[in-house]
């Protein structure tokens, strides 16, 4: 029959912050934080470089935009299969190239080694999504009033000075959008780690994230087969709070800098 439900209060949060969940939580949070820092730094930098290069292009811009943005619209399954094939430790072309260059010690199972699995996933994520900040920055560059640039050139400013003193400060709104969306994506990172490493963040939890842990707790995993909906719900609230307050704080801080500039 039906059982009367009782209010658990903060019991599930207490369990989340105690053994055996605390170790998983801290490891997953660390991976998400590392992913945000690395992806934000490299993806944004490469996206800005690509945007500036396309901004300077006079012919064939439409083709370059398609090429840069193409990985973004690829199916996740296609991306995962492509890179698993390229990084195959035995038959993948990347390890074969490394071996052919005379440095076979550098060839390794990139997705199967605990020291390289997370960096490799971040690299794949950057490759897939770098087109997004590139297009956003390109739109920001095209929105800049050309009179500012022409006036600076008349005054003898170099292209480097024009970019640093005029273009980059005016890209603050674009940078705000990219930073907030990257933060949200990094702390809700689920799809790529799940498709490549499974719900347990293989190998040996090296690619575990908060979203993967939430999935395991809420729906169980193939290995453990067990689930804990209460603790999973507590983790869901924690992720929502972290992402919501983090995005709001970052957006407010960056927009205040926009006003100051």
Image (cartoon, helix red, strand yellow):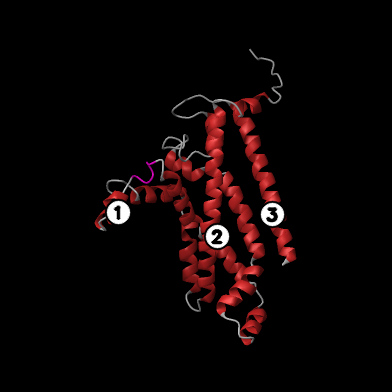
The residue lying toward the viewer, choosing from 247 and 101, is: 101
| Left or right of 203, for residue 254 | right
The residue lying toward the viewer, choosing from 230 and 170, is: 170
The C terminus, quarter of image: bottom right
Q: Give the spatial CA distance, label 2 vs label 3.
A: 16 Å
Residue located beneath label 3 in the image: 251
Check disc 2 and report its element: helix, strand or loop: helix
Asked whether the beta carbons under mark 2 and mark 3 sit within 8 Å of each other, the answer is: no
- Residue 119 tag number: none
Residue at 45% across, 65% down: 67
| Other residues around mark 3 within 10 Å, as few (<14) / some (14–19) / many (≥20) | some
**Sequence-earlier tag: 1 or 3:** 1
| Other residues around mark 2 within 10 Å, as few (<14) / some (14–19) / many (≥20) | many
Q: Is residue 110 magenta?
A: yes
In magenta, the rendered stretch is 109-113
| Other residues around mark 1 within 10 Å, as few (<14) / some (14–19) / many (≥20) | some
Residue located beneath label 1 in the image: 93
Check disc 1 and report its element: helix, strand or loop: helix
| Left or right of 75, for residue 9 | right
- Residue 44 tag number: 2
Where residue 249 sits in the image (x, y, percent)?
A: 70, 50
| Left or right of 87, for residue 137 | right
């Amino acid at each position: 029959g039906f059982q009367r439900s009782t209010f658990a209060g903060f019991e599930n949060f207490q369990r989340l912050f105690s053994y055996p969940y605390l170790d998983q939580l801290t490891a997953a949070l660390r991976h998400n934080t590392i992913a945000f820092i690395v992806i934000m730094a490299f993806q944004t930098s490469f996206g800005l470089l690509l945007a500036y290069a396309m901004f300077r292009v006079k012919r064939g811009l439409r083709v370059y935009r398609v090429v840069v943005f193409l990985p973004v619209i690829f199916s996740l399954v296609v991306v995962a299969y492509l890179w698993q094939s390229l990084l195959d430790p035995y038959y993948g072309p990347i390890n074969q190239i490394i071996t052919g260059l005379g440095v076979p010690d550098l060839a390794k199972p990139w997705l199967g080694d605990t020291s390289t699995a997370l960096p490799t996933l971040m690299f794949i994520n950057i490759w897939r999504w770098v087109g997004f900040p590139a297009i956003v920055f390109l739109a920001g560059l095209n929105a800049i009033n050309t009179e500012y640039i022409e006036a600076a050139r008349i005054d003898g400013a170099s292209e480097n000075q024009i970019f640093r003193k005029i273009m980059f400060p005016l890209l603050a709104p674009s940078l705000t959008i990219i930073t907030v969306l990257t933060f949200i994506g990094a702390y809700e990172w689920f799809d790529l780690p799940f498709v490549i490493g499974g719900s347990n963040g293989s190998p040996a939890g090296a690619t575990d994230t908060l979203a993967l842990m939430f999935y395991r707790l809420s729906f169980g995993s193939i290995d453990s087969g067990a689930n804990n909906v209460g603790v999973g719900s507590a983790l869901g609230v924690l992720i929502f709070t972290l992402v919501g307050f983090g995005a709001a704080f970052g957006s407010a801080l960056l927009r205040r800098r926009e006003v100051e500039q």
